[in-house]
Image (cartoon, rainbow, N blue to C red):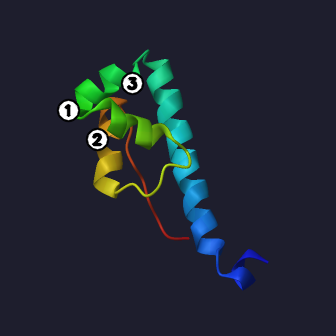
Amino acid sequence: MLAEEGVLEEFKGVAIKGFLAWQLANATKELHLSRGRLAERMDTGRGQVSRLLDPKGGNVALTTLQRPAGVVRCKVLLGFA
């Protein structure tokens, strides 16, 4: 149904972004990092961190994801299946 309407890829993108935001939120929680402290460690503003943590918050570049991943001691792994 979504493919027929031409929105399947958009929904996949939103789902992936939501999952990444969820993972980042959990990692920051485990490390007891506030949004402000994460932003400081990323050398960016709280607004950027808020956009990263917003599951519906638009597109995020791969390089943008790599910075917070490093701060929370994780890696961004991508692949094609």
Query: Mark 2: which secondary structure?
Result: helix
Q: Which mark is residue 1?
A: none
Q: CA distance from mark 2 to mark 1?
A: 9 Å
Quarter of the view holding residue 75 = top left
Outermost front residue: 47
Residue in the picture at 55% in, 45% down: 55
Name the amino acid type tagged 1.
Answer: Asp
Q: Is residue 15 above or below residue 49?
A: below
Which numbered disc flags the more N-terminal residue, 2 or 1? Answer: 1
Looking at the picture, how far across and down is residue 45, in whole percent? 27, 33
Asked whether the residues under the numbered discs 3 and 1 touch, taking CB atoms below 8 Å apart as contact, a structural biologist would say no
| Label 1: few (<14), some (14–19) or many (≥20) C-alpha neighbours in 10 Å | few
Name the amino acid type tagged 2.
Answer: Arg
Query: Mark 1: which secondary structure?
Result: loop
Q: Is residue 2 above or below residue 49?
A: below
Q: To which residue does mark 2 refer?
A: 67
Q: Is residue 22 above or below residue 58?
A: above
Looking at the picture, how far across and down is residue 49, in whole percent? 37, 35
Q: To which residue does mark 1 refer?
A: 43
